[in-house]
C-alpha cells in the first residue's frame, strides 16, 4: 500500500451538525474578543489547522499554540518553530496538561494585545477565544488556565446563551465554549492522519487504513525501529502492509483458522501511537526539512 493507493479510498464525509452551529457561534463571538489563541497539534501543525477559515479573521491578533508537544519529536518541533517564524507567525509548543507549561502564557498574551494596539478603549478584562479542531486540547488549556486562576464560571449577558465566559482573576476572560474549527481535508491521507491524532472519530474512519498510514509514515520517517522494538515487528523485512499481519501474529490476535485479526491489530497499533508508546513522533515536517 502506498500513499497514492490510500488516497483512492473515499473520504468519510463526516461533518456533524453541531460543528456547524459551533462555527457560527464562534463567528458571532469574534467581535467580542481581543485575541485568538489558535491551537494546533504539534505532531502535524499544518494539517491540524484550517487556514481558509482563519483567512477571514485576520483583523484579530492571533497567537499559535502547538499543543501535545510532549508527544511530538522535539527536533521536528524546532523546525516548525523556524518555519512559522519565517512566515511571520510565532508559535509556542506546549503540553497544556502541565501547569508549568501554561503558567506564563497570560502575561505573554497581554503583551501581544497591548503591543498590537487592540487593547479595549475602556477598562474591562481582556477577552480571549481559544479555537482549534476537535480534540486538539482546547478544553484542557482553558481548564488549566482556569484552575491556576481560581476562576468563577458564569453566563454572561449579551452573549449567545451557550457561550460561557471564564473570568480569570488577573484581568482576563476566556470564552469557555471553545471555537471548533472543522479541518478542510485535502485527501484520504489527511483524514487518516487526523484520525490517528484523535481529531476525527474512530467510528467513521477505517482503522486498518489508519494503521497502514501509520506504518507508511513510520517507514518514511525512518522510525520503523520503534515498531520493531515496541511491537516485535520485523520492519526490515516485508512491506508496511505486512507489518499489521506480523503484529497480529505476535500478539496472538487470531481469528478462526489462525488467520491474523488485522482489525484488532490495527486498533492496538493506533492505541500504541496515541499513548506515546511508539516514541515521540511528528507525522508532518515542514516542506524542505529532512
Ligand atoms: P478539545 O477541547 O479541543 O476537544 O480537546 P480536549 O481538551 O478535550 O483534549 C482532548 C484529549 O487530548 C484529552 O485526552 C486530553 O487529556 C488530551 N490532551 C490535551 N492536551 C494535551 C497535551 O498537551 N498532551 C497530551 N499528551 N494530551 C493532551 P482524552 O484521552 O480524550 O481524555 P482524558 O484522558 O484526559 O480524560
Image: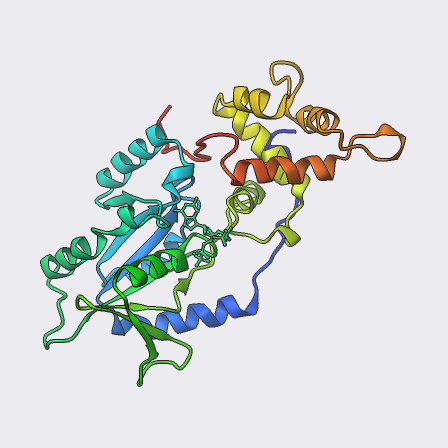
Question: At which x and y percent is residue 155?
Answer: 35, 80
Question: At which x and y percent is residue 66?
Answer: 34, 45
Task: Specify whether 31 is left or right of 250.
Answer: left
Question: At which x and y percent is residue 53?
Answer: 39, 59
Query: Residue, x 10% and y 63% (percent of image)?
Result: 117
Q: Is 80 located above or below residue 153 in the figure? A: above
The answer to which image quadrant residue 75 occupies is top left
Query: Residue, x 31% and y 85% (percent of image)?
Result: 157
The quarter of the rendered structure image containing the C terminus is top left
Question: At which x and y percent is residue 183?
Answer: 47, 54
Tell which of 14 and 94 is nearer to you: 94
Task: Specify whether 50 is left or right of 273.
Answer: left
The answer to which image quadrant residue 151 occupies is bottom left
Query: Residue, x 28% and y 46% (percent of image)?
Result: 101
Task: Specify whether 248 is left or right of 210.
Answer: right
Tell which of 110 and 9 is nearer to you: 110
Amino acid at each position: 500500500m502506498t500513499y497514492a493507493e490510500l488516497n483512492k479510498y473515499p473520504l468519510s464525509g463526516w461533518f456533524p451538525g453541531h460543528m456547524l452551529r459551533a462555527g457560527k457561534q464562534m463567528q458571532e463571538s469574534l467581535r467580542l474578543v481581543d485575541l485568538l489563541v489558535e491551537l494546533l497539534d504539534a505532531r502535524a501543525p499544518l494539517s491540524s489547522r484550517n487556514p481558509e477559515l482563519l483567512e477571514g479573521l485576520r483583523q484579530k491578533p492571533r497567537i499559535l499554540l502547538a499543543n501535545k508537544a510532549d508527544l511530538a519529536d522535539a527536533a521536528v518541533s524546532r523546525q516548525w518553530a523556524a518555519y512559522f517564524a519565517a512566515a511571520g507567525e510565532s508559535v509556542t509548543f506546549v503540553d497544556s496538561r502541565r501547569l508549568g507549561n501554561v503558567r506564563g502564557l497570560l502575561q505573554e498574551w497581554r503583551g501581544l494585545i497591548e503591543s498590537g494596539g487592540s487593547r479595549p478603549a475602556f477598562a474591562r478584562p481582556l477577552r480571549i477565544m481559544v479555537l482549534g479542531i476537535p480534540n486538539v486540547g482546547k478544553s484542557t488549556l482553558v481548564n488549566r488556565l482556569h484552575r491556576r486562576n481560581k476562576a468563577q464560571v458564569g453566563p454572561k449577558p449579551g452573549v449567545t446563551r451557550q457561550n460561557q465566559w471564564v473570568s480569570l482573576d488577573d484581568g482576563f476572560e476566556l470564552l469557555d465554549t471553545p471555537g471548533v474549527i472543522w479541518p478542510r481535508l485535502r485527501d484520504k491521507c489527511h483524514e487518516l492522519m487526523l484520525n490517528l491524532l484523535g481529531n476525527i472519530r474512530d467510528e467513521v474512519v477505517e482503522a486498518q487504513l489508519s494503521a497502514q498510514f501509520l506504518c507508511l509514515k513510520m517507514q518514511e520517517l525512518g522510525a520503523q525501529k520503534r515498531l520493531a522494538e515496541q511491537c516485535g515487528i520485523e520492519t526490515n523485512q516485508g512491506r508496511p502492509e505486512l507489518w499489521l499481519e506480523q503484529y497480529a501474529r505476535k500478539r496472538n490476535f487470531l481469528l478462526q483458522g489462525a488467520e491474523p485479526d488485522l482489525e484488532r491489530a490495527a486498533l492496538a497499533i493506533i492505541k500504541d501511537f496515541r499513548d506515546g508508546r511508539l516514541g515521540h513522533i511528528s507525522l508532518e515536517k515542514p516542506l524542505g526539512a529532512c
